[in-house]
Amino acid sequence: MPRSNGDRPRRADPCTLVVFGASGDLTQRLLMPAVYHLAAAGLLPDGFAVIGVARSPMSNAQFRARIGGALEKFAGVKLAAATRKWLLDRLSYLAGDFSDRKTFEQLSDALARRRHLGHGNALFYLATPPTVFAPLAESLGRAGFAQPKGDAWSRLVIEKPFGTDLDSARALNRRLRAIFAEDQIFRIDHFLGKETVQNVLALRFANNLFESLWNRDRIDHIQITVAETVDVAGRGRFYDATGALRDMVPNHLFQLLSLVAMEPPARFAADAVRSEKTKVLQAMHAYDGANAFACGVRGQYRSGRVAGKSITAYRRAHDVARDSSTETYVALKLLIDNWRWAGVPFYLRTGKALKARRSEVAIKFREAPFAIFRDTLVDRLAHNFMVVSIAPDEGISLEFNAKVPGPHIRLQRVDMDFKYKDYFAAEPETGYETLIYDCMIGDQTLFQHADDVEAAWRVVQPFLDCWRHDRANGLDFYAAGSDGPRAADELLARDHRHWRPIAEPVL
């Protein structure tokens, strides 16, 4: 993914970032702090501006004051006065209803003034509810924003979820692509902005030591975990209509899976990388109803304690139905029907109100023959895992057996750890910096293609169907602060395997 001819990335193209939903939480907590970090790194051009669009009445000065306060609170660094002023001076605000033609006429006038300053590039960021994506895109199309004049470019950024099932994903893609070309659409998943996630590609393809082992002959299975300690908090209305499967699996977890399982791309360019990721998702086995029920676990948290804090049962949360069967935890066993991964199960799990926050990919290698140790004190061999830790501590560890000092043959598991913080001085980030920058330079490597989205929902759809038809049965409960429902353990136990602990045991 070369972005410059030297070590330093080039500055982004001059452009206007138009944020729909500019008064919302996403803009203040993540988007604008990320833009500040880009400005502080010198990656934004002088010809950069932000136009915030939302329904709330607000003046330019009030908008700047709100974003200034958000930067102080969420940027994670002491703000540089000059950079703060540089950014806030480039902010303006437009109050209007997204369904009102006048809003887009006013936006057109504002962007026309930007064109007089030397460029007509526009990046439209929909920080809005998903139900607004298609109507907003269609309004942009009617206003002529999808087809800029001359050499100018126009791009559309949407957040997950990209649909709620296979049919809705197809319908959304169809409506978006009727207005914007595929290379104009950036389906953003902030999970892929994390350095450790991107480093999966470097780990595999820059180190033949590992890539030569990356196949069904050497790997027993792979576990992908995204565990959260937070409960649904104030998101009850959204979450009860969505659930853990829709919220996390077709995007976050499947993107991790595709990076881990993809074939080497011909080059690090967006089309080559995304093509290989798409092939993985298309090769994933789609179960029928009975097998989906057997290979999937859904759970819901009850009351408990997480890190000393009392957690109310999910069904008692605000805006959640008292008899809700929405899952807050999901575990899946998935298979990839290709030569490299035939017979290697991928176990995925994610949930809320769990014992610890942990996001990781764990590669379990096949066990060595035990025969040589039969006449020694060794009674078993420790498992060989390579673990790519994404959060909270970014790094890579390798677990293997070593001899304990002494006259007898005794083995013990040891760890070889690499921590990012020990080698690299990483600046605070929201996870959006790389992705927003890539939108500005037109690099789609870390973004989902329409084919990716539909391939992911094709795999998820059987689980949605069987759980919808049997909502009461098959829902397992777990105490907040635990590792999840017992049924998730049984899912692996049937294959004579077990999950890695979410939290390391306290010795």
Image: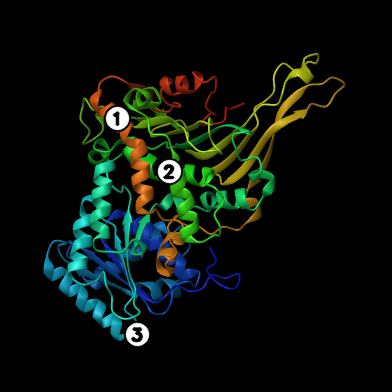
Q: Position of residue 351 (x, y in %)?
A: 40, 34
Residue 467: image quadrant is: top left
Q: Secondary structure at mark 1?
A: helix
User: Disc 2 and disc 1: Cα gap in Å?
Assistant: 32 Å
Please give the residue where the numbered disc 3 appears in the rendered image: 118
Number of other residues with Cα within 10 Å of mark 1, as a class: few under 14, some 14 to 19, many 20 or more: many
* Residue depicted at x 45% and y 47%: 279
Mark toward the start of the polypeptide (3 vs 2): 3
Q: Residue furthest right?
A: 407
Residue type, numbered disc 1: Tyr
Query: Viewed as shown, does residue 64 lie left or right of 263?
Result: left
Q: Secondary structure at mark 2?
A: helix
Q: Position of residue 173 (x, y in %)?
A: 28, 53
- Cβ–Cβ below 8 Å for labels 3 and 2? no
- Of the numbered discs in the image, which one, if any, rests on residue 281? 2
Mark yes or no: residue 107 visible: yes
Number of other residues with Cα within 10 Å of mark 2, as a class: few under 14, some 14 to 19, many 20 or more: many
Identify whether 378 is placed above or below 284: above
Residue type, numbered disc 3: Gly
Mark toward the start of the polypeptide (1 vs 3): 3
Nearest to the eye among marks 2 and 1: give it: 2
* Residue depicted at x 41% and y 68%: 440
Residue 175 or 398: which is nearer the viewer?
175
Number of other residues with Cα within 10 Å of mark 3, as a class: few under 14, some 14 to 19, many 20 or more: few
User: Disc 3 and disc 2: Cα gap in Å?
Assistant: 42 Å
- Of the numbered discs in the image, which one, if any, rests on residue 314? 1
Task: Indicate the colouring scheme.
Answer: rainbow
Identify whether 505 is placed above or below 146: above
Q: Position of residue 282 (x, y in %)?
A: 41, 43
